[in-house]
Image (spheres, rainbow, N blue to C red):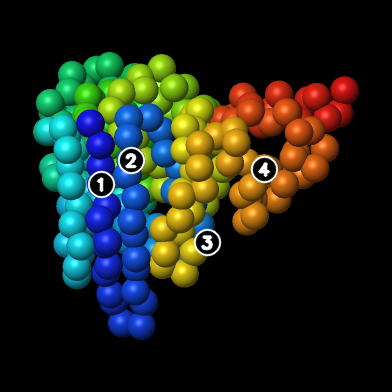
Amino acid sequence: MQLILDQITFSRSDFTLHAQGTFTPGVHLITGRVGSGKSTLGEIVGRALSPVSGTVRYDGISSSVLSMQFPEYHLTTTNLKDEILSWGRDPEPILETAGLIGRGGDDLLTLSRGELKRLHLACLITGRYDLMVLDEPFAGLDEEARYWISTHLDEHREGIIIIISHDVTTLPSIDQIWEMQDGVLTSIGHVSQALTTWTSAPPLIRYILNHDHELSGLSWHDLVEAVCRIHE
């Protein structure tokens, strides 16, 4: 199973995206500055946009799902129970997972953006997909919800999972790092070898590497453990 981006280009106004690379089973992080093209690439991979040129090949991939940053883009019904049923899920376990017990009949528009995000992600990540593309999955969530998502993804590492995020402080265990810079996708490499050569790594990662060369990953547990070692 693999996702192959073969000489992909996409243009909008004065912005042009270029992407080349192969994604294999595991968890991939695509990071980069706001406006660098991360979300656009996610929409191309998730089939919401078509590239201007090049080919996206889904070898051995029969099921895929795209989660966009703002949960209201995904709504198809009017109340929580019907929305969960539209995903083919059992409402009660999903409501419990999302922290929304007893609210199955509520209008979706009465939920906060954070509550909508929890509901959407609970429906999404409890499914089984060959390819899962998650654009800023942790945005708007509290620490408890972030930890639950990361833990669930760690425990159900099936197929190809692509996480698009500029926030690397709450993540599941990452297998490979990619970076978007001015519309160009670059493979940083496999963790942990890539961390020492990641020139634009976030400040927290650079701080840990400067004080502890044994950092082995980017998950929440990895970062906490590394910081604890530094301050022992």
Mark 2 lies on a secondary structure that is strand
C-alpha distance separating marks 1 and 4: 26 Å
According to the picture, the residue beneath numbered tag 2 turns out to be 23
Q: Determine whether, in the image, residue 163 is placed left or right of residue 142.
A: left
Instruction: Give the quadrant of residue 118.
Output: top left
Coordinates of residue 135 in the picture (x, y in percent): 37, 48
Q: Is 135 drawn above or below residue 123 in the view shown?
A: below
The crowd level at tag 2 (other Cα within 10 Å; few <14, some 14-19, many 20+) is some
- Name the kind of residue labelled 4 in the image: Thr
In the rendered image, which residue does mark 4 sit on?
A: 196
Q: Label 3 to label 4, Cα distance in Å?
A: 20 Å
> Label 3, on which residue?
33
CB contact under 8 Å: marks 2 and 1: yes
Q: Residue furthest bottom?
A: 14
Residue, disc 1: 4
Callout 2 amino acid: Phe
At 78% from the left and 25% from the top, the residue drawn is 228
Distance in Å between CA atoms under marks 3 and 1:
23 Å
